[in-house]
Image (cartoon, rainbow, N blue to C red):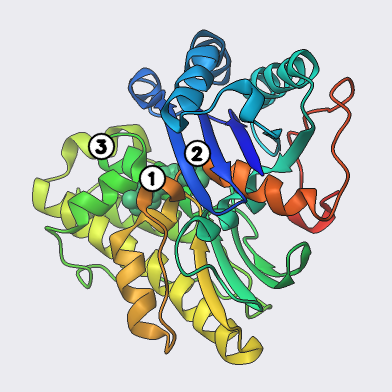
Amino acid sequence: MTILGIETSCDETAAAVVEDGTQLLSNIVVSQIDIHKEFGGVVPEVAARSHIEVIIPVIEKALKDAGKSWEEIDAIAVTKGPGLIGSLLIGTLTARTLAIAKQKPLYGVHHVLGHVYANWLVEPQPTFPVLALIVSGGHSQLVLFKEHFKYTLIGQTRDDAVGEAFDKVAKVLGLPYPGGPSVGRAAQDGDPNKYDLPEAKLDGPYEFSFSGLKTALLRTAQREIGESYDFPSSKVAAKLEPQQVVDLAASFEEAATATLVRKTKLAYEEFQPATVVIAGGVAASPYLRNKLSEALPVEINYAPRELCTDNAAMIASLAYFQSKHQPADDPYKLETQPSLPIERYT
Ligand code: KG4
Ligand code: ZN
């Protein structure tokens, strides 16, 4: 079954062709990072307008690279949520129109679940039960999959997602958007033990919280430059020495990673999954990958980084497995769902 996937939930316009959920035939991603960089984050209206401009050429290129004509496409998959409503609408309306015009079944899929399915695009595929650590700009979750579409959310963040915390910390340190890769790069030259940033104390063993850590980083930076806690965060970076920036980046990366690794290890010990996977943009972090591999007794088969950040291949992969469990969606009715929790997925 050959599926064309379309993904526009945030600031990447993406299309991909995947065979049977596992064989990647093409993967096109047009990133808007350069457009949003000057604002230090994604501007929703600008994102939606950029999606409109490139979505059709992106789809055409995905088909061309895969060497597939429309006749050879068996279904269309699109992200229906969660995400920015304006951005989601461009993808879903394009997919609905194409499904009607080309007479193809349409599958609206869950973006966050899609991230997990990037792991089905690498050999060997995960074996159930699968423990997934999902770490993106909007989510930080531990999910245990008994099998496809049978999963339990075992823990999630109480406040900020870890990627969001990386992005905010980058702003404080004067590092470019997106924060994950830029903090990671700066951290390579820094001392991860220079500043002791506290780990949040939470009731549930699998709950996360990154808001306190982000504030602790800001307070430490304010102290380092000899300013009080009401000194504006937007002015901190200008007063930091380069060595302080890299040490703060490294200490933050270490503290955020340590929490993720510790809780994943705890969940591994309790639930004894056959496979552990990581998913979402932060899963591209080499530091997180190294620390997780060191901590767990199982081998982790990491997806290439371009399949961790937003892409449409993961959407096409998930749609293949979804097609075995659920009927196709009505192309005249498929709605976007900007807030679509994983525990209430329908
Ligand atoms: O999954 P994703 O592309 O979009 C969402 O669904 O949110 O994740 C984006 C997040 C951003 O917060 C970005 O800073 C982070 O992933 N990220 C990384 C890396 N690449 C992207 N974080 C750490 N290390 C990376 N190499
Ligand atoms: Zn994502």
Q: Position of residue 8 (x, y in %)?
A: 58, 28
The residue under label 2 is 311
Identify the residue shown where x is 55% and y is 30%.
Answer: 10
Return the disc, 3 or 1, that comes first in the chain's sequence.
3
Q: Position of residue 147 (x, y in %)?
A: 73, 71
> Which secondary structure, mark 3?
loop
Q: CA distance from mark 2 to mark 1?
A: 7 Å
- Residue placed most toward the observer, 164 or 80: 80
Q: Amino acid at mark 3?
A: Gly
- Residue placed most toward the observer, 5 or 278: 5
The residue under label 3 is 174
> Which secondary structure, mark 2?
loop
Q: Which mark is residue 306?
A: 1
Q: Position of residue 248 (x, y in %)?
A: 24, 57
Q: Amino acid at mark 2?
A: Asn
Q: Amino acid at mark 1?
A: Glu
Q: Is 109 on the left-hand or right-hand side of 5?
A: right
Return the disc, 2 or 1, that comes first in the chain's sequence.
1
- Whether residue 245 appears in this view of the structure is yes
